Image (spheres, rainbow, N blue to C red):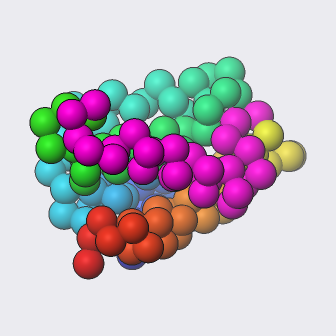
């Protein structure tokens, strides 16, 4: 579901990995995410520009928050544990959560991290189904 939107946002519209995941998940699940909201995850592209936490993970977690948080994160029962489970699932899928470890080498400018972003999209879909977050 989410992967259907990845190519358009990532390659055709030139959004980064974090922005693409947030926008793709929003499109797939009908979330009200405005262009200004997408800017909030923009800094996570390229692992915050220095190879730390993968932007695909950051964008996915932002979308998970949009799906699950009722009012505030720490007041949403089980949300913290759910995030922890998602991070573990992401790490199991990619063997790391850090961009510097996941980013393909050699890095090809024309396609960038499209495979990683597409796999992260599939992971998100599986995770929300397995956890009955969406039907």
Magenta region: which residues?
74-100
Q: Is residue 106 rendered to the left or right of residue 131?
A: right
Magenta includes 86? Answer: yes
What is the quadrant of the C terminus in the image?
bottom left
User: Where residue 42 appears, x then y in whole percent?
Assistant: 42, 30
Q: How many marks?
A: 0
Q: Position of residue 103 (x, y in %)?
A: 74, 44
**Magenta stretch: residue 16 in it?**
no
Residue at 19% from the left image edge and 56% from the top image edge: 31
Residue under the point 44% across and 45% down: 81
The quadrant of the image that shows the N terminus is bottom left
Q: Position of residue 60 (x, y in %)?
A: 44, 49
Asked if residue 76 shows in the view, the reply is yes
Q: Is residue 16 visible?
A: no
Q: Looking at the image, which residue is at 67% across and 27% down?
A: 52
The kind of secondary structure the magenta stretch mainly shows is: helix
Residue 89 or residue 37, whichever sits in front: 89
Taking the spot 74% from the left edge, 44% from the top edge, the residue there is 96
Q: Is residue 6 left or right of residue 133?
A: right
Q: Is residue 1 above or below residue 86?
A: below
Q: Is residue 26 left or right of residue 84?
A: left
């Amino acid at each position: 579901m989410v992967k259907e939107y990845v190519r358009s946002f990532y390659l055709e519209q030139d959004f980064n990995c974090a922005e693409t995941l947030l926008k793709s998940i929003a499109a797939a699940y009908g979330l009200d995410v405005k262009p200004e909201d997408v800017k909030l995850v923009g800094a996570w592209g390229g692992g915050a520009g220095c190879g730390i936490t993968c932007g695909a993970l950051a964008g996915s977690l932002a979308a998970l928050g949009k799906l699950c948080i009722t009012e505030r994160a720490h007041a949403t029962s089980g949300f913290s544990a759910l995030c922890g489970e998602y991070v573990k699932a992401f790490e199991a899928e990619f063997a790391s959560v850090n961009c510097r470890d996941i980013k393909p080498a050699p890095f090809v400018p024309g396609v960038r991290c499209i495979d990683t972003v597409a796999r992260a999209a599939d992971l998100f879909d599986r995770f929300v189904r397995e956890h009955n977050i969406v039907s």
